[in-house]
């Protein structure tokens, strides 16, 4: 029964992939960003909001070493282990030969310069919601970082997930809505929505996924098993999380919980990044978390 | 005679093993107590930082001084060999602590510095207290990330 279901879903994916072949690959062109100039200072804020260093810096990197985006960290999933590539400005091993539009295509559509699809282990499903201006600013900032000539590590992914082409079907099925919480929100919570649903990619860890790794938007931020092994990732909707807004802001700033233990697991790294944002942004995130629909 | 000696030796050994386990259990409780004390003093400082408790320079200074002196306890009594989470019950301390003494020491010293920074800052003004919370949280978190097992 379960196998049959899986086979069925696989067929749907294949059908989705066929659909993908007959539709033009999603691409942003030079002209779409022609009017935009990148500001590296703003780009640094985008960088910390997006948490790029958490995946693309070397394993265990601390302090300034987190700005060397040599790649190499592994991410376990139900489909295999993915390794973050080198995205430093090195022309051969990194993305030094790219243009701003290539980064925009990677983040908005999960499409590589050669037109192939990226795996959603790179959380473009969320990044797609960021503004084009943010991406262009980020591009300007990434170019100021040190280059590393570390070669990429190959992903360890089994058949059929090793066929990148099928990801076209995945994207077709699971690329999420432009906004998850569609209610009208006051300005602060609306700014929080942009950060949490977009660059902050909080839902990638805090939301449950279906058998094929698509986010379950009906249980948005409702908690999930931890793909990295032990324990679960907590429900952060008002259904479970009862911390006050000032408690949340303190947690995002120093990592202290309301009982003064400290944030653990991958969240420790997320906090390191959030702490670098202006306090208004952390307040906005807290306001949004109070406004999302409760998941019990 | 010989048998008696052997018997006594065995007893002594057993008692030795028993008391080592007992000593470890006590050390685990004691170091968790030290951690709880950190959290307790931070409760006041953090409450002020968040605006949940009105800022009081004297009280803040006293809490920060207590926190700083807690970082100076002799840690060799608190972290005996064999008290990691693979060998003992009731602890989340990872065996890696005993494999990387230099790094653990570095992280403990980083906490000492952050606590000294808070001691300087807490009595001055609310803003300086708030500014010292981040580095303190970073120092606690860095050690937990590397050396504490996740809460199961």
Image: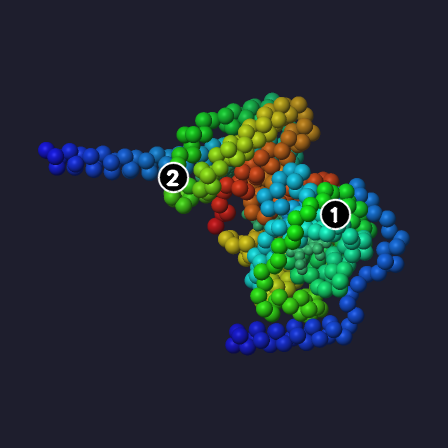
Residue that mark 2 sits on: B82
Task: Report helix, strand or loop for mark 2.
Answer: loop
**Residue located at (74% from left, 47% from top):** A89
Q: Looking at the image, which residue sits at the far left? A: B1
**Residue located at (86% from left, 48% from top):** A37
Q: Do the residues labelled 2 and 1 touch (CB within 8 Å)?
A: no
Task: Report helix, strand or loop for mark 1.
Answer: loop
Residue A10: which quarter of the image?
bottom right
Is residue A56 left or right of A5 when viewed as pictured? right
Residue A262: which quarter of the image?
top right
Residue that mark 1 sits on: A89
Classify B74 as above or below B2: above
Q: Nearer the viewer, residue B17 or A285?
A: B17
Q: Nearer the viewer, residue A274 or B126?
A: A274
What is the chain letter for disc 2?
B
Classify A226 as above or below A218: above
What is the chain letter for disc 1?
A
**Residue located at (58% from left, 35% from top):** B139
The answer to whether any part of residue A193 appears in the image is no
Is residue A148 left or right of A212 when viewed as pictured? right
């Amino acid at each position: 029964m379960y196998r049959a279901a899986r086979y069925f879903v696989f067929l749907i994916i294949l059908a989705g992939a066929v659909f993908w072949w007959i539709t033009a690959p999603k691409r942003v062109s030079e002209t779409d960003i022609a009017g935009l100039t990148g500001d590296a200072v703003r780009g640094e804020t985008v960088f910390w909001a997006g948490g790029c260093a958490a995946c693309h810096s070397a394993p265990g990197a601390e302090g300034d070493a987190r700005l060397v985006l040599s790649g190499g960290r592994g991410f376990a999933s139900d489909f295999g282990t993915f390794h973050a590539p080198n995205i430093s400005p090195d022309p051969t091993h990194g993305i030094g030969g790219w243009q701003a539009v290539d980064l925009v295509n990677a983040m908005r559509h999960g499409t590589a310069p050669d037109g192939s699809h990226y795996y959603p282990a790179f959380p473009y499903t969320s990044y797609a919601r960021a503004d084009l201006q943010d991406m262009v600013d980020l591009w300007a900032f990434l170019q100021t970082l040190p280059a590393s000539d570390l070669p990429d590590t190959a992903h360890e992914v089994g058949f059929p997930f090793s066929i990148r082409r099928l990801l076209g079907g995945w994207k077709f099925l699971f690329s999420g809505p432009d906004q998850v919480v569609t209610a009208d929100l006051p300005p602060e919570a609306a700014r929080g929505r942009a950060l949490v649903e977009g660059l902050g990619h909080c839902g990638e860890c805090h939301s449950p996924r279906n058998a094929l790794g698509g986010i379950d938007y009906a249980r948005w931020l409702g908690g999930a098993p931890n793909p990295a092994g032990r324990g679960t990732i907590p429900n952060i909707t008002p259904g479970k999380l009862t911390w006050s807004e000032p408690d949340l802001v303190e947690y995002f700033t120093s990592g202290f919980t309301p009982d003064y233990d400290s944030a653990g697991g991958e969240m420790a790294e997320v906090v390191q990044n959030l702490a670098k944002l202006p306090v208004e942004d952390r307040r906005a995130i807290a306001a949004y978390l109070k406004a999302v629909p409760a998941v019990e | 005679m010989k048998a008696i000696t052997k018997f006594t030796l065995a007893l002594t050994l057993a008692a030795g093993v028993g008391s080592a386990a007992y000593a470890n259990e006590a050390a685990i409780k004691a170091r968790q107590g030290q951690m709880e004390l950190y959290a307790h003093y931070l409760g006041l400082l953090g409450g002020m930082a968040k605006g949940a408790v009105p800022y009081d320079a004297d009280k803040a200074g006293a809490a920060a001084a207590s926190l700083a002196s807690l970082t100076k306890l002799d840690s060799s009594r608190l972290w005996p060999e064999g008290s990691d989470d693979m060998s003992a019950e009731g602890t989340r301390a990872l065996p890696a602590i005993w494999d990387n003494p230099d790094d653990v020491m570095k992280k403990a010293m980083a906490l000492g510095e952050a606590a000294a920074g808070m001691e300087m800052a807490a009595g001055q003004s609310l803003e300086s207290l708030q500014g010292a919370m981040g580095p303190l949280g970073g120092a606690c978190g860095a050690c937990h990330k590397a050396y504490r097992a996740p809460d199961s």
